[in-house]
Image (cartoon, helix red, strand yellow):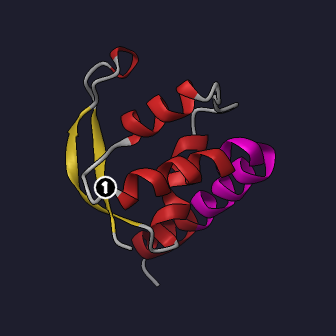
Amino acid sequence: MSQGTLWGTMGGQRRDQGIKQRVKRDPHFHEQALKAIRILARTGQDFTADEVQELLAAADVTPTHPNSMGAAFNAARHAGIIRRTGYRKSTRPAANARAIAVYVGVR
């Protein structure tokens, strides 16, 4: 096994552990974020984390950690609810126009 392959494997394991920690430490946010993702996925329109955050903010739901949103999107992607279609600039001022993933529902 090459060093690159080993590091890639270790990185994937650490990512997966981090996702599990986020879900375990913030189950309410995770559940609410998945609900919002499902709602947007059912529209058939492209959406980003910006739109999910808008729905959550309207329901007064906030994450306890910055990685919580990513954990919810990762879970939705692995569950076959959404797929990534590309990237675009975030519209949230706090994100400073950084590139964020664009998703669409698959079922």
Counting from the top left corner in percent of width and height, residue 104 is at 30, 59
Tell whether 91 sits left or right of 20: left
49 in relation to 104, above or below: above
Label 1 secondary element? strand
100 in relation to 89, above or below: below
Counting from the top left corner in percent of width and height, residue 26 is at 75, 43
Q: Which residues are magenta?
A: 13-30
Q: Residue furthest bottom?
A: 1
Tell whether 15 sits left or right of 90: right
Main secondary structure of the magenta stretch: helix
Name the quarter where the C terminus is drawn: bottom left
Q: Amino acid at mark 1?
A: Tyr
Residue 25 magenta: yes
Tell whether 10 sits left or right of 29: left
Seen at 25% across and 51% down, the residue is: 46
Seen at 28% across and 24% down, the residue is: 91
What residue is disc 1 on?
A: 103
Counting from the top left corner in percent of width and height, residue 16 is at 62, 63
Seen at 36% across and 22% down, the residue is: 95
89 in relation to 14, above or below: above
Closer to us: 5 or 60: 60
